[in-house]
Image (cartoon, rainbow, N blue to C red):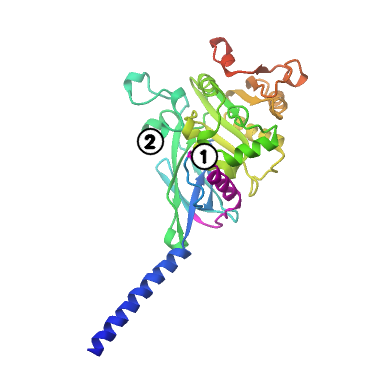
Amino acid sequence: MDILRLSHTLTWFGLCFAFFANTSAQARTKKVDIHVYPGYCAGTRCVIKGRIVRKSRFIKGTAKQGRLGSMMAMIRRFTRKYIPYASVRVSFQNKQKVVLADKKGYFYATFVQPTQLPPSSRPATRTSQPTTPSKHTLGYRTYQMMPDKALKKWGVLPVVAELAWPKKQKLQGTPTHAFMLQGSDLPGISIISDIDDTLIETFVYKKSKMLRKLLLSNPSQVRIFPHALDALRQLHKGPTTLHYLSGSPVQLLDRMLAIFQHHNFPVGSLNMKRLSGQEKYSLLHQTKYKADAIREIFKAYPKHRFVLVGDSGEKDPEIYAAIRRLYPKQVLAIYIHNVTKANATQKRFRGIRLFTHYKELLSPSSKPSQ
C-alpha cells in the first residue's frame, strides 16, 4: 500500500514538474512580429526588406481601438525591442531564401527575376475575369482576396516571410504576407504621393495637434481628405505604378497598413523613414530622406514619367521642384494640396498645380497629358 501511495505521489510530482517545465520553456520563447515593407523591383532585381520585432499585446492589428489602447499601442511601437540575428525564410516567385537579420533586426532578401512582366500586362476585358477588379480599383483590402496568379497580371508579386527554424531560435510568430511591385524598363507613368496632410489629415505643420491625433486616434478614426482616394484612383488608371512616400518613422508601419486596409487605399509601394540600421535618417530631416527615396524610384523606372503629389505644409514643393530640375524630361506634373491656405503666387509654387479640394483633380481635363 505504501509503495502504491509513493508511486502516485511521484507520478503527481512528475506531472507538476513537466507542466511547470513546459510553462517555463514557453515563457522563454519570444513572440515576434515580422514586418515586411511593400516595395518595388528595380528592373529584374527585387530586394525584399523587413524587420523582426517583439510582439506586443497592446498592438492588436485592428483598426478599431479606444483612446487608451491607441495611446498604449503608440508607446509600444517605439519602445518594443527588435530581434537581432534572427533567421527568416522569404518566399517569392516560387523561390525561397533564408536570410539573417542584422543587429537591429532588419533583414534583406534579394531575388533576381529571369523575365520581366510589363506593368500594363492585364486581362483584355473585364468579362474575361469577372471576379478580378480593374487596376484602378485594386486596393489594399481587395488585393488580399485575390489569388496569386491574378495579382501577377497587375504586376503585384506576393511575398511571404516566416521564421526559419522557430523552435531552434526560441521564437514564435505567424507568417507575414506582403507584395512587391514588378519593375519595368518599358515606358509608362508612375505616381509618387506623399501621405501626411496630402491624403490624410495629420497636421504635421501643427506639432501639438499632430501628436494628439497620433496618440489618441485609431486607424478607423483617421480622416481621409474628401475625394482624395477618388482622385488618386483616377491618376492611377492605365499602365501606372503607385508609390507612397511618408516621412513617418517605420515603427508606424502596422498602423499605416491598417489605415490603408480600412480605407482600401489603391495598392502601391510604401516608403517610410528608418531611424536606425543601414538606411537611417534623422527624425526631423525630411528633405534629404524624401529626395533620396524619390531618386531611387526614378532609377527603378528609367523610362517612366512621373506625377508628384504633395502638400504645402512642409517642403514638398521645394523637394519636387529640385527633382524636376534633375529629371526635367521625366516629371510630368506636380500637384500640391494647399492645406495651409498659402498664396498661389508664391515663388515656391511656380510651375506647380496648387489645389485646395480634390474635386479639382477629378475633372478629365485635370489629368496630365502624356
Residue found 32% across the figure and 23% down from its top? 130
Q: Is residue 43 left or right of residue 212?
A: left
Q: Secondary structure at mark 1?
A: strand
Residue 65, x across and y down, in percent: 50, 42
* Quarter of the image where one finds residue 133: top left
Q: In front here: 147 or 19? A: 19
**Residue with the most extreme top position:** 365
Q: Secondary structure at mark 2?
A: helix
Residue 148 has which mark?
2
Instruction: Specify the amino acid type for callout 1.
Output: Cys
* Quarter of the image where one finds residue 151: top left
Q: Is residue 369 above or below residue 135?
A: above
Residue found 30% across the figure and 79% down from its top? 11
* Quarter of the image where one finds residue 143: top left
How many numbered callouts?
Answer: 2
Residue 370 visible in the snapshot = no
Magenta residues? 63-87
Instruction: Specify the amino acid type for callout 2.
Output: Asp
**Residue with the most extreme right position:** 347
Q: Is residue 192 above or below residue 167?
A: above
Residues at circles 1 and 2 in contact by the CB criterion of under 8 Å: no
Please name which of the two marks, 1 or 2, marks the residue nearer to the observer: 2
Residue 46 has which mark?
1
